[in-house]
Image (cartoon, rainbow, N blue to C red):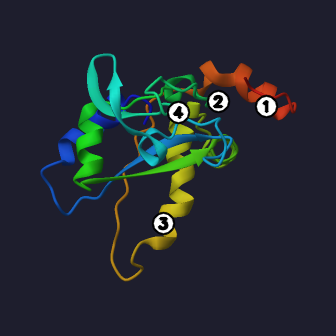
């Protein structure tokens, strides 16, 4: 989700359809049990960032916390207020995906489909392995995933990680 602009763009067409479930995926970084993530809705609290009241990753004094993700597009300590509203009203569900899970999904999608997704999109693809087993098996399901960017821009990061280098 990051700041939420891409996600709210795809959510917009489905907001008025209560039969459609909306899922946003946050950057779980090295894990939400560490301080190296950007899981704003999972672990943030209400605060002010860039003049807007929303959920923010912050310390006990309200100072913005450093965040981490291998995805530059998700490496943000706040969330758009639209997503804060969707989260509070439970209209959308949000979950973190770790850097490792995103990389595994990126590699799987590349090998199986010939599509190199952006690391941002790989987070959403990774969430499918958690979501799909929870869906009813006796009912036809349609899932739309916003694969919003090309992964060729991320190849330097991908190659570094595959070589075992730590991403900072």
Q: Which residue is mark 1?
A: 161
Q: Residue at x 56, y 30 (%)?
A: 118
Q: Is residue 77 left or right of residue 4?
A: right
Q: Residue at x 48, y 42 (%)?
A: 26
Above or below, 141 relative to 20: below
Q: CA distance from mark 2 to mark 3?
A: 24 Å
Compare marks 3 and 4 and give the one earlier in the sequence: 4
Instruction: Estimate how packed mark 4 is, as few (under 14), some (14 to 19) or many (20 or more) residues with alpha carbons within 10 Å.
Output: many
Compare marks 1 and 2 and give the one earlier in the sequence: 2
Residue contact between numbered discs 1 and 2, judged by CB atoms under 8 Å: yes
Q: Is residue 89 left or right of residue 154?
A: left
Residue contact between numbered discs 2 and 3, judged by CB atoms under 8 Å: no
Q: Which residue is mark 2?
A: 70
Residue contact between numbered discs 3 and 4, judged by CB atoms under 8 Å: no
Report helix, strand or loop for mark 3. Answer: helix
Between 36 and 3, the one lying in front of the other is 36
| Residue 30 image point, x, y percent | 68, 41
């Amino acid at each position: 989700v990051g700041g939420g602009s891409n996600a709210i763009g795809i959510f917009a067409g489905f907001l008025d359809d209560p039969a459609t479930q909306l899922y946003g995926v946050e950057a779980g970084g090295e894990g939400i049990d560490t301080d190296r993530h950007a899981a704003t809705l999972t672990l943030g609290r209400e605060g002010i960032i860039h003049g807007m009241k929303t959920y923010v990753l912050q310390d006990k004094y309200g100072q913005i916390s450093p965040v981490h993700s291998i995805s530059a597009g998700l490496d943000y300590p706040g969330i758009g207020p639209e997503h804060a509203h969707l989260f509070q009203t439970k209209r959308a569900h949000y979950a973190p995906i770790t850097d490792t899970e995103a990389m595994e999904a990126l590699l799987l999608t590349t090998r199986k489909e010939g599509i190199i997704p952006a690391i941002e999109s790989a987070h959403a693809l990774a969430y499918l392995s958690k979501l799909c087993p929870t869906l009813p098996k006796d009912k036809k399901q349609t899932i739309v995933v916003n694969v919003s960017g090309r992964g060729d821009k991320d190849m330097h990061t991908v190659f570094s990680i595959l070589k075992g280098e730590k991403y900072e």
